[in-house]
Image (tube, rainbow, N blue to C red):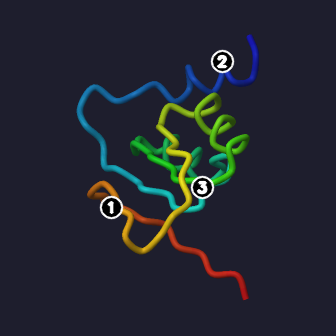
Amino acid sequence: MSYSDYLRNLLKPALSRSPLVVYLFAGCGGLSLGFEAQGFETHGFEMDTDSCATYKKSLKGNCTQVFLTPERELPSATVIPYSALK
């Protein structure tokens, strides 16, 4: 069994709707992996095409390939992770 198949089996979706995590600047989804492991649904937003493709292949959640602007409407979310580089 490949590692991605192992993760898909490990992160099977819950039967009921889970809290949604909207992840801005998602990259390939490393933080989303942890949220999915705890039963959250995830939706990543990432401008890099290859990173977004990796996110979609590796995780259950969706990734929207987009350049984010302040005008961009986002889905209603339970959690929006934030990190600041200093």
Tag nearer the camera, 3 or 1:
1
Q: Residue furthest bottom?
A: 86
Expressed as whole percent of the image width and height from the top left, the position of residue 43 reads 45, 46
Q: If the image is split into quadrants, where does the C terminus sit?
A: bottom right
Check the image and report above or below for 54 versus 21: above
> Residue 81: x percent and y percent?
49, 67
Alpha-carbon neighbours of circle 3 within 10 Å: few (<14), some, or many (≥20)? many
Locate residue 59, reporting x and y percent.
57, 34
Amino acid type shown at disc 3: Ala
Of callouts 3 and 1, the N-terminal one: 3
How much space separates mark 1 and mark 2, taking CA atoms? 33 Å
Q: Which residue is mark 2?
A: 5
4 versus 68 height, above or below:
above
Element carrying mark 2:
helix
- Nearer to us of marks 1 and 2 is 1
Residue depicted at 69% across the width and 36% down the height? 54
Amino acid type, callout 2:
Asp
Which residue occupies the extreme top position in the image?
1
Badge 1 is on which residue?
Answer: 73
- Is disc 2 in contact with disc 3, using a CB cutoff of under 8 Å? no
Give the labeled residue for mark 3.
26
14 is higher (above) or lower (below) than 44: above
